[in-house]
Image: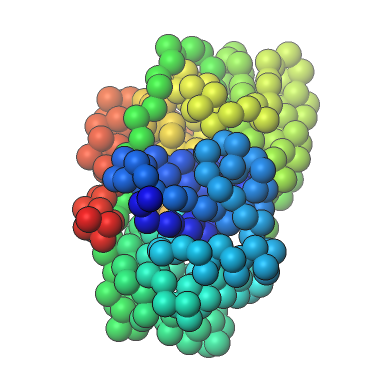
Amino acid sequence: MGRRVLISGYYGYDNFGDEAILGVLIDHLRRLDPEIDITVLSNNPFKTSKSFGVRAVKNFSLLGLLSAVSSCDVLISGGGSLLQDITSFKSLLYYCFVIYLAQVMKKDVIIFAQGIGPLIRDYSKKLVFGLLNKCQMITVRDLKSQMYLLDNGIQAELVSDPVFSVDFPIGEKEEVVGVQLRAFRSIDDAFLFTLARQVITYFGDKAIELYVFQESIDYEICKKFEKMLKTISPGVKTQIIHNISGNDMILKISRLEYMIAMRFHAVLVSIKTGVKTLAINYDAKVEKLAYDAFLPLLTISIDEDMDPPFERLLQLNPEDLMNYCANQQFEWEYFDNFFV
């Protein structure tokens, strides 16, 4: 039997991006060692086990967690932004507790492609930095996280997002525009209506598909946006895309002509498949991706003139977007060396 690996992250919540990262990680581990034994801490163990062919344990089951950690050789924590307290202090304590348990039980700990911070509480900083100092490997997905750790005396390797390394199926392009939205504290109805009016102005003659990447967060705002589109233009053809597999979601996105997206992985999948993409800046990771890939970027403000970013969207070259992604392959070297 190969090594016994336990994976901890935001899994089992039907979030497209996190599930995609988990799939990439599991596939790579199996290529490294066909005999590897993988267990995932998940909010939905049955679905995770069925989807990825792994053993899965309920993430908030203390007995299950203790058993899973004690049985593993290596804990992999990540990817995503797990070690931050601006969204939820409770979730930070949970992910730190998992790392702490592994370290107490003398297990190797890998921090995998994470974004570190923001950490707004002094206790959070002390806790996270104390744990990270004892990890066997740390890889982070952005320069800001790397510098943040370095300023606090912690070395970390900089890697790209693991999803960059996936080869996606690409469908034949159609005259369809995608819009991917998620609920966010600074998005109000005024912004949504302004955006809807802009979409109709530029793409009112095309079919419009609204993409739900996480049902609990995205669906209601997509439904609201769809109603706004129809209020502005009753004849517009719309469809909400949800409750489909990750592969089907990717294939649908790949056939789009344009995409207007908030979530990082919605932007990433779109440009990897040659879809002209406008990013909505709700998070630093989206802003950085848009900057690096030379994408138009829209701020969440009704005072912004939306015409310039929409005009830039029309002028994008799909080949340039795909070439950018081809040069952003995930750096597995550091990770692989640990398992050799």
Q: In this view, does 132 lie to the left or right of 221?
A: left
Q: Which of 78 and 158 is in front in this view?
A: 78
Q: Is residue 65 above or below residue 42?
A: below
Residue at position x 26%, y 64% in the image: 157
Q: In which quarter of the image is the C terminus?
A: bottom left
Residue 177 percent coordinates (x, y): 54, 23
Asked if one can make out residue 54 in the rendered structure from this viewpoint, the answer is yes
Q: Is residue 164 left or right of residue 243?
A: left
Residue at position x 58%, y 15% in the image: 206
Question: Which of the colour schemes (rainbow, by chain, secondary structure, one colour) is used?
Answer: rainbow
Residue 34 percent coordinates (x, y): 34, 41
Residue 327 percent coordinates (x, y): 22, 40
Asked if one can make out residue 25 in the rendered structure from this viewpoint, the answer is no
Marker count (numbered): 0
Q: In this view, does 22 lie to the left or right of 189?
A: left
Residue at position x 69%, y 40% in the image: 215
Q: Is residue 126 above or below residue 64?
A: below
Residue at position x 56%, y 62% in the image: 68
Hey, which quadrant is residue 218 in on the image? Answer: top right
Hey, which quadrant is residue 193 in on the image? Answer: top right
Q: Which of 53 and 179 is in front in this view?
A: 53
Q: Is residue 44 left or right of residue 264?
A: right
Residue lying furthest front: 1
Q: Which of 289 and 6 is in front in this view?
A: 6
